[in-house]
Amino acid sequence: MAQRLSKSWSLLAVCGILDALFAAVILFMWSPDGFATLRSFVHGRSAIEQLGLLALVAGVCAIAAGIWNSKQAASWFLALNGLACSALGTMVMLGASRPVKFRTIALLIVVMAASIAVYELVSARKLRQHPFEEWLLARAGVVSIGFAMVFLGFFLGWIRLEPSPSAQAFHWLGSYFAFSAICMLGMALGYLRPSGAIRRDPLQTA
């Protein structure tokens, strides 16, 4: 049990770090002279390919964490989040040579946000003996639902990206991945006791 939980928290921690890097890179790319500066650090790879690789690896980590805890039904929503993230990363990497519509990316974000929201809300219900953690996970689930609704609005055309679709798309993607990073790192820390000991799976009934 301890070995399984140790791998789970480390996978979520890596996923959170990669999400944070994705958010930092995509927001930095839209800053003044961001592209020129970023190209000096990517060593021959385009910035788009770097973004895609970050999302792809983050998705693989989330899938692995979900499968590792497959005995808990809600963990499959974590795996679904990782699958959508991996698909997004693959599309972004291909987007360096083949344009990808923002509507397609928005749909994948809907799947990511909705699936992690279910995971967070179900996890919160299992933490009633830990009120503060329950409150945090429940609020994270609500915010994730909010992101899912916003990106669904983008996908269905209910929300228009005006006046510059590229700028707003970058900002929304960066904001979502920044929030996702906080959630993943928070859930990873939730597996550890303050003393550093491995905590019981938050999806198990206390």
Image (tube, rainbow, N blue to C red):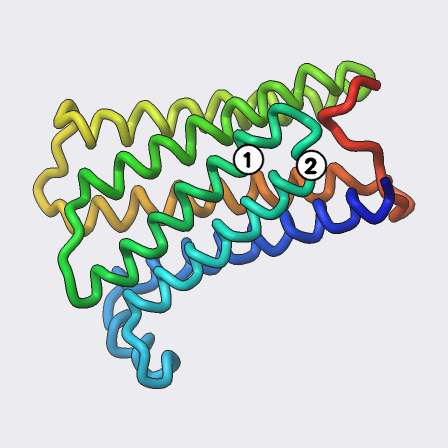
Q: Quadrant of residue 158?
A: top left
Are the residues flagged by discs 2 and 1 in contact, CB closer than 8 Å?
Answer: yes
Quarter in which the C terminus is drawn? top right
Q: Which residue is mark 2?
A: 69
Residue 172, percent across and down? 30, 42
The percent position of residue 99, horizontal first and vertical second, equals 14, 57
Vertical placement of 114 versus 28: above or below? above
* Left or right: 23, with 188 as reference point: left
Classed neighbour count for the residue bearing mark 2: other residues with Cα under 10 Å, few (<14), some (14–19), many (≥20): many
Q: Nearer the viewer, residue 42 or 168?
A: 42
Asked where in the image residue 186 lies, by quadrant, the reply is top right
Q: Residue at x 87, y 48 (%)?
A: 196
Q: Is residue 13 above or below residue 130?
A: below
| Residue type beneath disc 2 | Asn
Please say if 6 is above or below 32.
above
| Distance from Cα at disc 2 to Cα at disc 1 | 10 Å
Q: In the rendered structure, find residue 78 and report the number of the disc placed on it.
A: 1
Query: At x 73% / y 43%, what residue is drawn?
Result: 189
Left or right, residue 10 beside residue 14: right
